[in-house]
Amino acid sequence: MKKYQIQTFENIYFTQPEIFLPTKKITNDDIFKAVKEEFEGNEEVLKKIIKSLKRSFKMCGSNIRYVPEDNSVTIAGLAASAAKQALQVNSIDPEDVQVLVFGGISRAYYEPAVAAEVANILGIEQIHAFDVSCACSGLLEAMNIGANFLLNNPAIENVLCCSSELPEPVIDHKIKDPNELILKAGLMTLGSGAAAVLLSKKKFKNGGFRLNSYRNTTYPKQWDLTVSYILKPWVFNNIGMFELSRDLLPGEIREHLSAVNWTIPELRHIAIHQLGDYFLDWIFDALNLTKEQMYLIHSYYGNVGSVTAFLSLHHFLKKHTLRQGDKFLFIVPAGGFSIVSATASWDA
C-alpha cells in the first residue's frame, strides 16, 4: 500500500489566530469540590479518589480552566466571538467571506452544521458553510480543506475557519471508584474557548503565515482511545494517548520536516496540542527542543480540544515579535488515533 504523502501549498496565507475565552476561571480545587459534592459512599474511598485525581492533575500540569459564567454561552456563540475578532483585526467584511468551516468537537445538536449558526451570528446572508469532525485536530483539518478550496476555485477569496469547545455539560464528576478515573480524569482537565483564522490567496494587511505543507496520519486500530459520545458521558484514555504520542510524535515531526527540507533547530515555535505536560517532557527530550520552541500552556488553559494548538501559538505571540521567514510547525495528536501537522512561515 502506498503511503500517504505530505501535501504542499503555494501562495496560501492565514492570519494569526484570534482567541476568545469565557470570563470565568476554575482551578483544580473547584474540580475536587465538585467530585466531593457528587460522591456517595465511604469516606476512605473518597480520599483515594481525590488522591488519584491530584496525581493525575500533577502529571498533566493542570491548574486553570476557563468556563462559561452561565448557560447563555453557546458553542456557536463562542466560535462567532473569535471569528468576529479575526474579521475585525484583518479588516475583512463578513460578506467578503465565501466559505466558513467549523472544526470543533463540541456540538449541541446533530444538525444543522454549527458553521451555519456561526454565519448567522456574524450576519452573513449567504455562504458555503459546513463542519469538519476530526477530534482535536478539527481546526487544523478545517484549514487544510479551506486551503484546497482556495486552490481549486478562483471565485473563493476568503475562507474563515473557526472552532470552539464547551465540554462542561459532558464532564462527569460522579466517581464511585478510583479505577473510574482511568477514563474520566482526563475529562476533568478540559476547558472552554474558541479560535479563528482567515485564509486567502493574498497577503493580509497585517502580514500572515504562508502555509507550506499539511499531513494527516491516522492509526485506526486505536480509534477508541477517546470517544466523545453524543448521548452519554465522554471517555478519555489519557495514559493511552500519552503513550502513543510519546512513541509516534517525534518520528512524525522528523518525517514531516524532512519532507519540506526543514530541520528542528530552524523552528521558531511548535504550536502543539497539549494533553498535559507529562508527554511534552518526552517530546522536549526526544527532539532536544529549547523552551522557546515549545511552551507548556496546559496549566493556563487546560485541554481546550481543537483550540489548544492555536492557544499555544497565541501564547507565544503575546511574548515574542515575529520575524520575516520564521518557521512554525503545527501538530495535533488526536483521537482516531491521528497525528495532524502543518508547516508555515511568517510573511510580513
Image (spheres, helix red, strand yellow):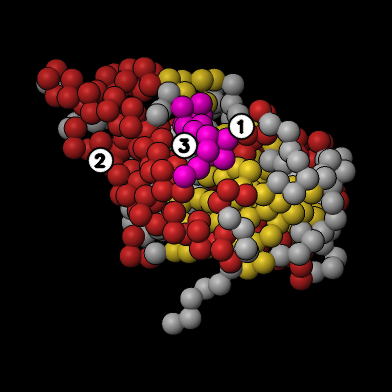
Relative to residue 23, is residue 275 drawn left or right? Answer: left
Q: How far apart are marks 1 and 2 (CA)?
A: 30 Å
The amino acid at mark 1 is His
Q: Residue sitting at 33 percent across and 60 percent down?
A: 222
Q: Position of residue 124 (x, y in %)?
A: 80, 47
Camera-side mark, 3 or 1: 1
| Quadrant holding the C terminus | top right
Please tell me whether mark 1 sits on a helix, a strand or a loop: helix
Q: Residue sitting at 75 percent across and 49 percent down?
A: 325
Relative to residue 8, is residue 111 drawn left or right? Answer: left
| Quadrant holding the N terminus | bottom left
Please tell me whether mark 3 sits on a helix, a strand or a loop: loop
Q: Distance between the residues labelled 3 and 2?
A: 17 Å
The amino acid at mark 2 is Ile
- Secondary structure mostly seen in magenta is loop
Ranked by sequence position, the earlier of labels 1 and 2 is: 2
Dot label at residue 303: 3
Q: Which of 71 and 330 is in front in this view?
A: 330
The amino acid at mark 3 is Asn
The residue that mark 1 highlights is 315
The stretch of residues the image draws in magenta is 288-303
Q: Which of 85 and 167 is in front in this view?
A: 85
Decide: few, some or many residues near mark 1? Use Cα within 10 Å; few <14, some 14-19, many ≥20. some
Relative to residue 107, is residue 160 drawn left or right? Answer: right
Camera-side mark, 1 or 2: 1
Q: Does the magenta stretch include residue 16?
A: no
Please tell me whether mark 2 sits on a helix, a strand or a loop: helix
The residue that mark 2 highlights is 182
